[in-house]
Amino acid sequence: MKEFSLVTSWYWLPVMAVACYLIGCLNFAVIIAKTRHKDVHKLGSGNPGTMNMSREFGLKVGLINFLLDVSKGGVPAMISYFIFRNYVFAGTNVIVSDFTRYFCGVFVIIGHIFPVTMKFKGGKGIASTLGLFWFCLSCETPWYILIAFVALLGVLTFIIVTEWGSMGSLLGVTGFSLWQGIIFFVRYQGLNNAYVIAIFMLLLALNILTWCAHRKNLIRLFAGEEHRTSVKKLSKGKRGTKNM
């Protein structure tokens, strides 16, 4: 392993932060809606995300939007993994790519939720966050691709059964966070340096960002007023939303 010093290579952080934020600002829901001469902000819930796109344009379009957002969250992190996987922070055993993967991911999600291109009013970041974890876990341990896929099917099953899209999505993000957190805990057990703390803070930040972005959904959910998402209706080309 080569050593990576932030003292001499600090410029990597602002470069990654700005690049990933701008990538996050690229909203595929807005682009897809415009190809159909629609403004996604004026459709359904007004949220430029997978759920709203599925409700308004059908499950196929929603799936395309989901896969694009998944890639947006995962690809930048995967690139940073291949750049820094053979480096450790100077004077430590902390792998640099463990930090950069989620550093990139956090800024992509910030860009998605608070895009400068849309007056800082973007989507809620679920698909990109799930994609981030899927890519991050899988690029290091390839067979995790299948396990993560099964986990995503579990999230989908929860949404199908309960019709609570937002809650199912948030539980998925939290579940992936715990999975990755356990791996890092085992890997760095006994190490309490700033880099390890920073890695866990990034995982926490992802949860804070996505849960806070869904605060209105959670309020409606607890008040019994949250819109339900019927995957069955969406698969038949019908609007899959109804009030409780």
Image (spheres, rainbow, N blue to C red):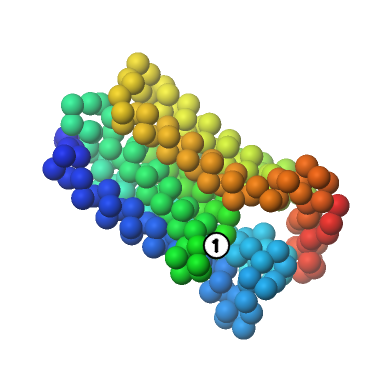
Q: Residue furthest right?
A: 244
The residue most toward the top is 190
Q: Which residue is mark 1?
A: 122
Q: Position of residue 140 (x, y in %)?
A: 38, 39
* Residue 50, placed above or below residue 40: above
* Residue 42 visible in the current orientation: yes
Query: For this rendering, which residue is in front, 94 or 220?
Result: 220
Q: Nearer the viewer, residue 123 or 129?
A: 123
- Going by the numbered disc 1, the residue's amino acid type is Gly
Task: Check the picture and name the quadrant holding the N terminus.
Answer: top left
* Numbered disc 1: secondary structure: loop
- For this orientation, the residue located farthest to the bottom is 37
In percent of width and height, residue 185 lies at: 42, 24
- Residue 73 horizontal/vertical position (percent): 46, 54
How many marks the image carries: the answer is: 1
Residue at position x 42%, y 32% in the image:
200
Residue 21 quadrant: bottom left
In the rendered image of this protein, does residue 72 appear above or below residue 135? below
Residue at the (59%, 50%) spot, across then down: 213
- Quarter of the image for residue 195 reads top left
Q: Which one is nearer the viewer's eye here, 147 or 177?
A: 177
Query: Going by the image, does 182 lie left or right of 153?
Result: left
User: At x 50% / y 62%, what residue is drawn?
Assistant: 120
> Which residue: 31% across, 40% down?
97
Outermost left residue: 8
- In this image, 91 relative to 58: left or right? left
x and y, in percent, of residue 59 in the image: 69, 64
- Residue 68 visible to the viewer: no
Q: Residues within 10 Å of mark 1 (few under 14, many from 20)?
A: many
